[in-house]
Amino acid sequence: MSVRTDIPELLRIQFFNGQRLTAADLTELQRANRELRWLHNRSLHGWGIGIGYGVAGERGDSAVTVAPGYAVDCMGRELILTGTVVMTVPAVAAASDGSPAVFYLTATYKEDPAQGVAEERPGVCLPGGTVRLTEGPLIAWREQKDITDGIDIILAQATVANCQLDSPLNLAVRRAARPSQQPYIAAGQTLPSATVWSMKFEAGIAVGITTRVDTTQARFQATPVYFAHVMGARTLNTAQGPQFAATLVAISQPSPGGFSCDVYLPAGASATGSVYLDANEIQPLLNTLPWSVVWVGIEG
């Protein structure tokens, strides 16, 4: 989600001696100051975790702990957690395909009606009312499809099997509100034996191959700019004999934890003459394709 860009309609609040103040006057003053603060936050600062919100959970745990913290969402609203929260791991056995289920622990701003009442007072000749509300976010487990980027601040990623963590929490998915003071650069290379390729189709036509590259070990806090190229012999033994595969690499679906490396296979030349390489001929070779991906990510 992009940062909210509309400007709230605000009036400068004034008072005069002898003025009769009502609850509406003081509430409007608070609303105006809050809207100004939120406008400042979203205009001049990034959204994400500012400080704290540490999350602890190891393989086999049935609950995780969230430490106090401060974050800002893309609307400029502050998400302030003042005490430690213990969250039970989602009670699921596995995903629909039998693999560990993936959940994200998130913090989301709660509007006034959703906050708890901290103090009430009796009125003078009128009914009493609330004078203090709690200030805290909604901490919840969500599936990726239910997350609104920028509104739900991701604190950690968890893989769950049999109602407990299947592996330690992944904290690389967190986004920092404060940008790095200098670019952060990391690089890596996949192993040919561990690089799983599949056919890439566009408009129903096979145009090449693709693989998902995992960069979680780099621990990027935000989505970096990725650069990648393919390593390996370009001459492939196809049904029509040795063929030279000219490769054109593109990056898609980038995230802090990885990206898709799409390899397009345009017309090339074979060892016996000029031909057009049919991408479908690569299908039988996918499991033994001797290619790996070399990548560089630049954050900040």
Image (cartoon, rainbow, N blue to C red):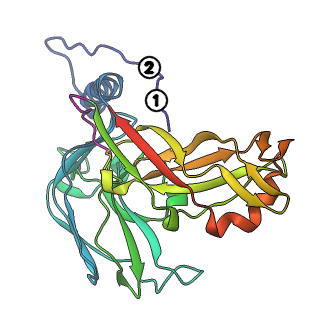
User: Mark on residue 7?
Assistant: 2
Count of all numbered marks drawn on residues in the image: 2
Q: Nearer the viewer, residue 191 or 117?
A: 191
Name the residue: 45% across, 47% down: 294
Q: What secondary structure do most residues of the magenta stretch adopt?
A: loop
Choose between 79 and 193: the one closer to the eye.
Answer: 193
Q: Which residue is labeled 1 in the image?
A: 4
- Marks 2 and 1 sit apart, C-alpha to C-alpha, by 9 Å
Question: Magenta segment: does it hold 139?
Answer: no
The residue tagged with tag 1: helix, strand or loop?
Answer: loop
In the depicted structure, whether residue 151 falls above or below residue 83: above
Residue 285: x, y in percent?
A: 70, 65
Identify the residue at horizontal 49%, vertical 83% (top origin). 94
Residue 167 in view: yes
- Which residues are the magenta region? 175-182
Q: Quadrant of the C terminus?
A: top left
Instruction: Please rate how many residues cluster around mark 2, counting C-alpha atoms within 10 Å: few if below 14, some from 14 to 19, many from 20.
Output: few
